[in-house]
Image: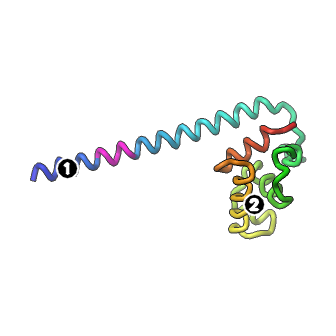
Amino acid sequence: MARSHDRALDMAITALLHEAVEHSRAMRQVLHQVGQLAALRIELTRPDENDDGFPKVAAYSHVLSPLTKREREVLDQLVRGHSNREIARSLGISERTVKNHLRNIFTKLGVGDRTSAVVKALGSKN
């Protein structure tokens, strides 16, 4: 009986350690992305801006040239920090279509997530 308790405790400890490692990796990724955005913020002293103060995605054309007009519109909304639902409403398309555009954007920009797409778009201004 004591052995089964020990085994259960060992399994619980192992599971918690695995969870801590995964959490640590996720936190490192988030901190890295925050660092990228902070560095970008410092680097961009006066970007070309829309009326709302957000940088114009069109100003970053050399990296974004493979994107379609609609993908640029989606990326522009992404730069503003909008959710998929907000992007869909703003552009009059479905959330599924937004997800398809984002997948295409990530592929064309060679990134794996929303933050990296924004950093790549804004950090590549000429």
Above/below status of 110 relative to 87? above
Q: Tell me the element at label 1.
A: helix
Residue 10: x, y in percent? 24, 46
- What is the chief secondary structure element of the magenta stretch? helix
Residue 115: x, y in percent? 68, 46
* Point 61% across, 36% down: residue: 32
**14 lies left or right of 65:** left
Q: For the C terminus, which image quadrant?
A: top right
Tag of residue 7: 1
The segment highlighted magenta reads: 13-18
Q: Between tags 2 and 1, which lies in front? A: 1
* Point 47% across, 39% down: residue: 24
* Point 82% across, 49% down: residue: 64
Which quadrant of the view contains residue 72?
Answer: bottom right
Tag of residue 50: none
Given the image, on which type of amino acid does mark 2 rest?
A: Ile
Which quadrant of the view contains residue 122?
Answer: top right
Given the image, on which type of amino acid does mark 1 rest?
A: Arg
- Residue 91 lies in the magenta-colored region: no
The Cα atoms of the two marked residues, 2 and 1, are separated by 50 Å
| Mark 2 vs 1, N-terminal side | 1
* Point 28% across, 49% down: residue: 12
Q: Which residue is mark 2?
A: 87
Residue 19: x, y in percent? 40, 46
